[in-house]
Image: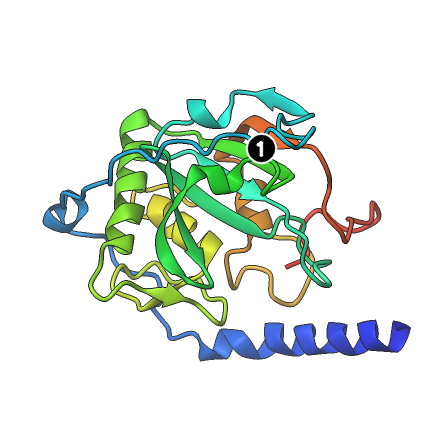
């Protein structure tokens, strides 16, 4: 097993060293024009919350703090840790931006779409934090609208197989944290923590880099259970 972890670490280091050369220069898009930044987008009507499972004693979250999911505002962020095999190089594994009406703009394996906020509730997710960006309410709403516009493109963008840091609104692929980062990048807010440990630092947007950015703060959470595998205390705050 130790040998397996060593091989995995070497592979990740190689990816971290090679991937930056595959990213074209000028990948960060230029400042948008007034017409493109003010483009109207439509948010579907609210999705009614799913009723709790009365047969389960865990229907009500056991550990919550701050505001609830139903109190989020457009532009707020949802970040979670999920049960995934060998997730040891980042703490948080998924990120989305709340756009209002009970919907979250996310880049998932099955597409860049609007998903119901109930997907983030307990017991579907057991370790979720709610974040708010330190900017005006208007900019938070604009960031949410920008993310919605991405989900309404024809054809819609797909999930990105490899990480980049590219805010081009016409690109064909996004991964979860890059979509959220780009939504605020176009509002003049860079949700990207620099530094950290590892060969890939500074080259792509990870969930942890958004979570630890100085422009965000926590407004609520539900953390009933930390999914496996855990997070060794001796690890640095940011690796990838």
113 shown above or below 79: below
Color encoding of the figure:
rainbow
Q: Residue at x 49, y 30 (%)?
A: 51
For label 1, the crowd category at 10 Å Cα-Cα, with few meaning under 14, some 14 to 19 and many 20 or more, is few
Q: Is residue 97 left or right of residue 163?
A: left
Q: Secondary structure at mark 1?
A: loop
Q: Is residue 50 left or right of residue 232?
A: left
Q: Is residue 118 visible?
A: yes
**What is the total number of numbered labels drawn onto the structure image?**
1
Q: State which quarter of the image contains the C terminus.
A: bottom right
Specify the quadrant of the image occupied by residue 49.
top left
Q: Is residue 192 visible?
A: no
Q: Between 213 and 77, which is closer to the camera in this rendering?
A: 77
Q: Position of residue 64 (x, y in %)?
A: 63, 24
Q: State which quarter of the image contains the N terminus.
A: bottom right
Q: Residue at x 38, y 75 (%)?
A: 24
Specify the quadrant of the image occupied by residue 72.
top left
95 shown above or below 65: below
183 shown above or below 69: below
Q: Position of residue 212 (x, y in %)?
A: 59, 41
Q: Residue at x 30, y 33 (%)?
A: 46
Residue furthest out toward the front: 55
Q: Position of residue 26 (x, y in %)?
A: 33, 68
Q: Which residue is mark 1?
A: 53
Residue furthest out toward the top: 66
Residue furthest out toward the right: 2
Q: Is residue 33 left or right of residue 152?
A: left
115 shown above or below 62: below
Specify the quadrant of the image occupied by residue 157.
bottom left
Q: Position of residue 73 (x, y in %)?
A: 37, 27
């Amino acid at each position: 097993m130790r040998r397996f972890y060593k091989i995995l670490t070497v592979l990740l280091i190689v990816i971290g060293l090679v991937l930056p050369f595959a990213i074209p220069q000028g990948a960060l898009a230029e400042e948008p024009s007034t017409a493109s930044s003010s483009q109207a987008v439509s948010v579907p009507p609210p999705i009614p919350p799913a009723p709790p499972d009365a047969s389960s004693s865990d229907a009500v979250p056991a550990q919550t703090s701050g505001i609830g999911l139903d109190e989020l505002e457009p532009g707020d962020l949802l970040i979670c840790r999920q049960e995934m095999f060998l997730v040891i190089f980042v703490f948080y594994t998924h990120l989305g931006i709340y756009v209002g009406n009970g919907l979250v703009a996310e880049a998932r394996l099955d597409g860049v779409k609007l998903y119901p906020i109930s997907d983030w509730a307990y017991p579907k997710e057991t370790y979720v934090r709610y974040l708010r960006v330190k900017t005006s309410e208007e900019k938070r709403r604009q960031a949410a609208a920008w993310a919605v516009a991405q989900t309404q493109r024809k054809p819609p963008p797909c999930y990105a197989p490899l990480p980049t840091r590219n805010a081009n609104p016409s690109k064909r692929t996004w991964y979860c944290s890059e979509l959220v980062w780009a939504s605020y990048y176009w509002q003049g807010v860079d949700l990207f923590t620099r530094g950290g440990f590892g060969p890939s630092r500074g080259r792509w947007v990870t969930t942890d880099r958004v979570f630890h950015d100085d422009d965000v703060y926590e407004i609520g959470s539900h953390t009933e259970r930390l999914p496996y595998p855990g997070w060794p205390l001796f690890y640095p705050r940011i690796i990838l």
